[in-house]
Image: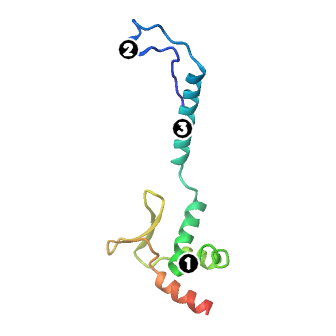
Amino acid sequence: IKIAISMTDAGPFASSTPARTSSVLDYYFLYSLVLSLLIMQNEKAEPTEAEIEHNELQDLATSLGICCDTEFDKFRWFLVQCAQSQLPPGWTKELDPLNRVYYYNGREGKIQSTHPLLFKFRVFFHEFVE
C-alpha cells in the first residue's frame, strides 16, 4: 500500500490560511490510518486450505454429533476420511464467497451445506462407536 499525504496542505482555504506545520498529532493520525489499512487488508486475506479443511471438519463433526471440544481430535481420522470420500455422481464440492464448503448437484440443481453422504457417515459412525 502506498499512501502520499501532504502534511502542509491547507485545503481549499490555502489563500487565506497559512500552511500548517506537521505535529505529533499529524504523524499519529497518519500512523493510525496506515495501521488501519493494513489491518483491513489482512482481514480480507484468503484463508489457507488448512483453515478451510478445519472448518469443514468441524461442521462435519457437529453434523455427526461429535463434540468439537472433547472428541474432535479423537475422531479426526474418521472426519478426514468422510471429507475426502468420493462424492456421488453429479455432486461437486464448492466454496461460497465466505469460503464455506457447500455441495452442488448439477443434475438436479440442488445446493446443500451438508455432505451428500452425511446420513451414511452418521450410521457408520454410530455403529463404530457402539
Amino acid on which disc 1 is placed? Cys
Identify the image quadrant of the C terminus.
bottom right
Q: CA distance from mark 3 to mark 1?
A: 41 Å
Q: Are marks 2 and 1 in contact (CB under 8 Å)?
A: no
Which residue is rendered at x = 38% and y = 14% of the image? Answer: 12
Q: Is residue 54 left or right of residue 92?
A: right
Mark 2, mark 1: which one is toward the viewer? Answer: 2
Q: Earlier in the sequence, mark 2 or mark 1?
A: 2
Circle 3 sits on which residue? 36
Element type at mark 3: helix
The 10 Å Cα crowd at callout 3, few under 14, some 14 to 19, many 20 or more, is few
Residue at the spot of label 1? 82
Q: Position of residue 128 (x, y in %)?
A: 61, 90
122 and 68: which is toward the camera:
68
How far apart marks 2 and 1 lie (CA) works out to 64 Å
Looking at the rendered structure, the kind of residue marked 3 is: Ser
Q: Amino acid at mark 2?
A: Pro
Image position of 51 with respect to 64: above or below: above
Location of residue 23 with respect to 42 vertically, above or below: above
